[in-house]
Image: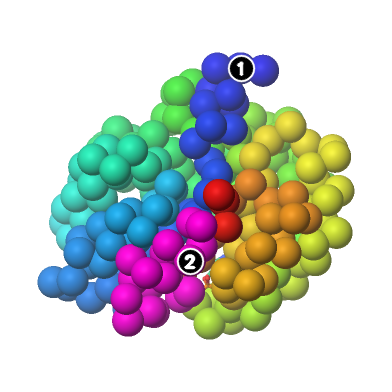
Amino acid sequence: MSERRARAHALIRGLYAITDAALMPPPAFAARAEAALRGGAQVLQYRDKSNDHDRRGREAVGLLSLCRQYGATLVINDDVHLARNIGAPAVHIGQGDTSVQEARALLGPEIIIGVTCHNSLELAIAAQLAGADYVAFGAFHPSPSKPDTVLATPDLLRAAKKQLSLPVVAIGGITPQTGSFLLRAGADALAVISGVFAAPDVEAAARRYARLFG
Ligand SMILES: Cc1ncc(COP(=O)(O)OP(=O)(O)O)c(N)n1
Ligand SMILES: Cc1nc(C(=O)O)sc1CCOP(=O)(O)O
Ligand SMILES: [Mg+2]
């Protein structure tokens, strides 16, 4: 196994919290992100669909510094140029985003690349062959944060664990209760937006997920 994929196995696990601009409006953005890290998030994805480049740059740099402080891994969603500009350790790309090959060519051999594979083992096998370092499946439940998803089943996680050698992330409407079932089916990480960032006490909510990982 390559050094980078071994690093992905070590880093892409546990609670994988994803930021949400609507649930984390300024000036509370950084404080809510830090609360998730205090609660035990091991991975934090910066997901912001706006075109405000200055704010996106500032927020991403702030999150990178917070993640370093807490020993967590920052993942930049969609924007490979932002990831390169700030020296992020990981990016996440979807099927309609930059390809794995293009992202790798731009970002080099060290960066961890994660790929959305919806409910398709075939997409995941292709992502692994293309050089991805983790795959994400979902949505396992209807998602309040992203209503236009297809549904995935726990059997997909079981099949993926047998056929892939990459960490597997589960996403979509996951609560601590349903998360425990997905972990038993083979998920290495639980990616969550609303379950963490819509909670009045973000740290306590994050801790409820983090505890599932022992
Ligand atoms: C961990 C994780 N899994 C899936 C997604 C979804 O990515 P994508 O399909 O590109 O959709 P957007 O998030 O970009 O709207 C994700 N971001 N993170
Ligand atoms: C960003 C994203 N991608 C999904 C997919 O299925 O690929 S579901 C989703 C949103 C996850 O947020 P919540 O935890 O609030 O459901
Ligand atoms: Mg995307």
Label 1 or label 2, whichever comes before in sequence order: 1
Q: Could you tell me if the residues under marks 1 and 2 are in contact, i.e. CB atoms within 8 Å?
A: no
Q: Is residue 209 magenta?
A: yes
Residue shown at 71% from the left, 61% from the top: 182
Residue shown at 80% from the left, 46% from the top: 160
Q: Is residue 83 above or below residue 55?
A: above
Tell which of 139 and 101 is nearer to you. Answer: 139
Q: Residue 94 carries which label?
A: none
Q: Disc 2 residue type?
A: Arg
Q: How far apart are marks 1 and 2 (CA)?
A: 33 Å
User: Where is mark 2, residue-wise?
Assistant: 208
The secondary structure that dominates the magenta segment is helix
**Stretch of the chain drawn in magenta:** 194-211
Q: In which quarter of the image is residue 146?
A: bottom right
Q: Which mark is residue 2?
A: 1
Residue shown at 20% from the left, 64% from the top: 31
Q: Disc 1 residue type?
A: Ser
